[in-house]
Image: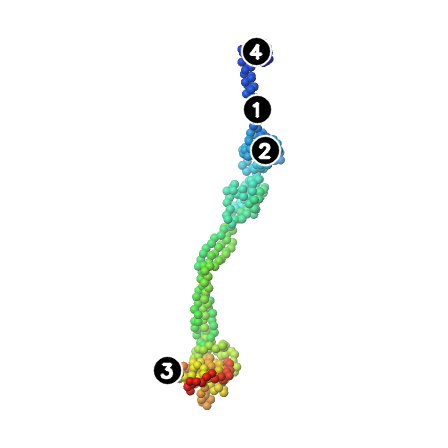
Amino acid sequence: MLKTLYSRNGGAVTGKAAVILSVIMVFTAVFSVGAGKYVGSLNQASVTDNGNTVRRFTSAQTIEAFIDELKLEISPFDHIKDNGTDARGFYNVEIEHAVPLTITADGKTVTTYAAGITVSELLERDGIKLGIYDTMNFPEDTTVFEGMELEITRIEFRSETRTVTTPYETEYEDTPTLKKGDTKLMQAGVDGTSDVIITDKYINGVWDSSDIEYLNVVEPVTEIIARGTALADPVSKRQGNFTLDENGLPTEYEYVLYGKATAYTARDGHGTYSGRPLVVGSVAVDPEVIPFGSELYIVSRDGTHVYGYAIASDTGDLTEAGVLVDCFMGRTEEHYGDACRWGAQFCDVYVLKEGNNTVLWRDGYVS
C-alpha cells in the first residue's frame, strides 16, 4: 500500500497518503523501540515446585528480588530455596511447601507448619524464647521435618539463703569422783551456725531436686557432762586411771585388802614420809603391807563411805593400832570435823597398782 501511494504521486507521498504513512512509521518506530527495551530487561528463572520444573520470565534484576515476587504466590509458611544462578544466567529456585509439626512447651502442645528452616529459626519465627537453662530434644541447628515433635523442657533454679543452727550434742563421761546420780558440767555446749544457700531445681514448673551449700560454718561445741559412778560422794577427787562397775567397785585391780580405815588432818607445813605432796588423796600405810606409791581405791563395805582414789604416801603406827589405812582429809583448820565424822570405817582397799616403796625425799619431813 505504501508502495502504491508512493508511485501515484511520482515517487513522492503527498496529501492524505502522506499522513497515513507518517502515522504508520511513527507507530512502527514506537513499537520497535518499546518492544526492544522490554525484551532486553527480562530475566529467566527455573522454578521447581513439587518435582515439576517450569521456566519463567521476570523483570526482577536479582534472584533475591525474584524470590520476594514468588513469596506473594505461596503460603507464608512455605520456603523458597535459593539454588543460585546457573551458567546461562537463569535464576534457580525450589519451592519447599510447609509440613506439619508440633511444639510442646509450657504445658501445651501446638501444631504449626514450616519448611526449610532450622529449629532455632522456627522458634524465632513463632516468638518462643528459651531460658538460659532450658533444653530441647533436638539441636537448634536441626532442619525441621514433617512430623517433628519438638519438646522444650523449661528448667528453673530458685535460690534462698538461710542462717541455720546446728544443735550441739551431749556426751556423758563416767567418773568415780562423783556419786551415782550426781553430774557435773565439764564443758558447756554451744550450738553451731552456718549460712545455707538452698537452690531448688524445677523442671517444667515441678520441683525436681535441691542443692545445699554451706558457708561461714561454725561447728557446734559438744557438751560434756561427768556422771558419777561411786557409791557415795568420794572424799578424794583425784582421778586415776581406773573405772567402776555398776556396783561402784573397780573393774580392774591387783588384789584387795579389808580392814579399818581411819582419818586424819595436818597443819600447814606437814609432808609425807615418802616425800610425796600431802594432799587429799594421800593415805598413810604400813609400807610392809601396802608399799609406798601404790594406787588404791578405798570404799566401805556397806558403801556408805567412799574415800576414793588414793596414793600410799605416808606412814605411822598403824598396824599396832589395827589400822589398814589412815586417810588424809585436809588441813586441820578446815577439815578436822570431816575427819571426826569419818571416824573409823571398815573398808575394802583395792590395790589398783602396787608401788615399789620408793621414798622420793625426806628433808623437811614432820612426823
**Tag 4, which secondary structure?**
loop
**Tag 3, which secondary structure?**
helix
Q: Is residue 54 visible?
A: no
**Tag 1, which secondary structure?**
helix
Looking at this rendering, what residue extends furthest in the left direction? 333
- For the residue marked with disc 2, what is the amino acid? Tyr
Q: Is residue 41 above or below residue 207?
A: above
Q: Kindly check if marks 4 and 3 are in contact, taking CB atoms under 8 A apart as contact.
A: no
Quadrant, the N terminus: top right
**Residue at x 44% of width, y 57% of height:** 162
Which residue is under mark 3?
Answer: 333
Which residue is under mark 2?
Answer: 91
Q: Report how far apart the C-alphas of labels 4 and 1 lie in the structure.
A: 31 Å
Q: Quadrant of residue 115?
A: top right
- For the residue marked with disc 4, what is the amino acid? Ala
Q: Quadrant of residue 34?
A: top right
Sooner in the amino-acid sequence: mark 2 or mark 1? 1
Which residue is under mark 4?
Answer: 12
**Residue at x 54% of width, y 48% of height:** 135
Sooner in the amino-acid sequence: mark 4 or mark 3? 4
Of the pair 194 and 50, the residue shown nearer to us: 194
- Of labels 4 and 1, the one closer to you: 4
Sooner in the amino-acid sequence: mark 4 or mark 1? 4
**Residue at x 56% of width, y 19% of height:** 28
Q: Report how far apart the C-alphas of labels 4 and 3 lie in the structure.
A: 172 Å
